[in-house]
Amino acid sequence: MRISTQQLFNRGLEQIQDVTAQQQKTQLQLSTGKKVLTPADDPIASARILELNQELAINEQFQRNIELVDGRLELQDDMLGSIDNVVQRVRELAVTAGNGILNASDLNSIAVEVEVLLDQLAGLLNSQDASGEYLFSGFQGGEEPFQKNISGAYTYEGDEGRRFVQVGPSVSIASTENGKEIFQDITVNENTFYTLTNPTNQSQPAAQITTGQVIDQVVYDDFYPEDLTITFNTPTDYSITEASTGRVVLANQSYVSNDPILVNGIQFEISGAPVAGDSFFVQSSEKQGVLTTVEKFVYGLQNFNTTETGRAAFSSAIESALSNLDSAETSILEARSQIGARLNTIETTKEQLLDVEILTKEILTNIEAVDYAEAISLLSIQQTTLEAAYSSYSQVTSLSLFDRL
């Protein structure tokens, strides 16, 4: 078989290029620390490396989720601690107010401090995180949870949802609380009520209804759980009916702004200038929010009178405030214990994720990491082979028939 000069050149060049490519690959392995550079190097190992890298990425996301949830829960726990401190201070003032030697002036002074604490408490219940979302509004992170209604009483405007964040392959943690469950749905010691202004009322400025109080529990219990509707027939007289039956309880009563209205064992006031058709509601309830409890306590302090009936009503108001504040503290402590349990779960999950990360990285290293001693030895062999290829190529390409003449 005839071998041309061109074939000799090509064979030598191909050998040099092959060895050079192998050497470059080895150098790249040494520089990157990885022995599997492309799927072609080891298809099975490449598939496993891809799978392990995906597991690490998911693990890292779980750890970021944990940092987010941990910070949010820590903030909620701190806020609940501050809220509990305010509730305790209000309770201390309720105990002080129960001292029979205090007069109306003393009680008014206590009422001033309690009103300040009420605003502070509402501010804490409306706390926000670093991103500006409200902590206790459920899913409605952008909605202030506790807002004043037309009459100046606080109502809950959030929802009852909780946001869950996945922090592990099979672990999800609630990262938010809803204020309704913790601060609003608190079972009271005795049947109570709350007042509302009909939002469709036409008076300008809007007439308001006070939070009121139970002045005769026995009478109110006989009426409970019925609701009342106060409807103005004219700007100067009103009627009160049972909400469910329409039965008239009081008819054509003369209206004087801020005068006490007593009906079925309860007392409240309406202020302003209602117009004909305006209405207000008294709704019975077996639950009462902590803000409403403080509002009713303030109402009792401000409406104290020295009559026998007045003292009995005030004594009942103090007793109710103390009992309901205790219930509020219990609800807050339960919420803190739940948050503490979640924080423990997060800590355990975080440790597990770190263990999994270490193990996964170890497996990944065993599969893709280069053996430096082996690679350096191979590089040395390849360098020797390349030098031999250069020398052989040089000698072959220098051959000429003139050398034989």
Image (tube, rainbow, N blue to C red):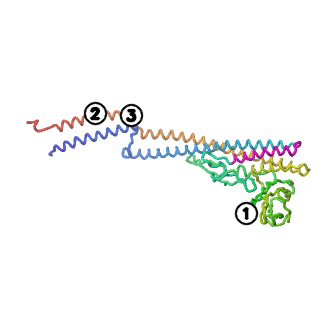
Q: Nearer the viewer, residue 142 or 28?
A: 142
Is the residue marked by circle 2 packed among few (<14), some (14-19), or many (20+) residues within 10 Å? few
Q: Residue at x 18, y 44 (%)?
A: 6
Q: Which residue is mark 3?
A: 372
Q: Which residue is mark 1?
A: 200
Q: Residue at x 70, y 47 (%)?
A: 123
Give the percent coordinates (x, y) of residue 172.
60, 48
Q: Separation of disc 1 and disc 2 at Cα?
A: 95 Å
Q: Earlier in the sequence, mark 1 or mark 3?
A: 1
Q: Earlier in the sequence, mark 1 or mark 2?
A: 1
The boundaries of the magenta stretch are 100-125
Amino acid type, callout 2 = Thr
Side of 142 relative to 225 (left or right): left
Q: Is residue 247 above or below residue 306?
A: below
Q: Which residue is mark 2?
A: 384
Side of 322 relative to 181 (left or right): right
Is the residue marked by circle 1 packed among few (<14), some (14-19), or many (20+) residues within 10 Å? few
* Quadrant of the snapshot with the C terminus: top left
Amino acid type, callout 1 = Thr
Q: How many marks?
A: 3
Side of 309 relative to 387 (left or right): right
Main SS type for the magenta part? helix
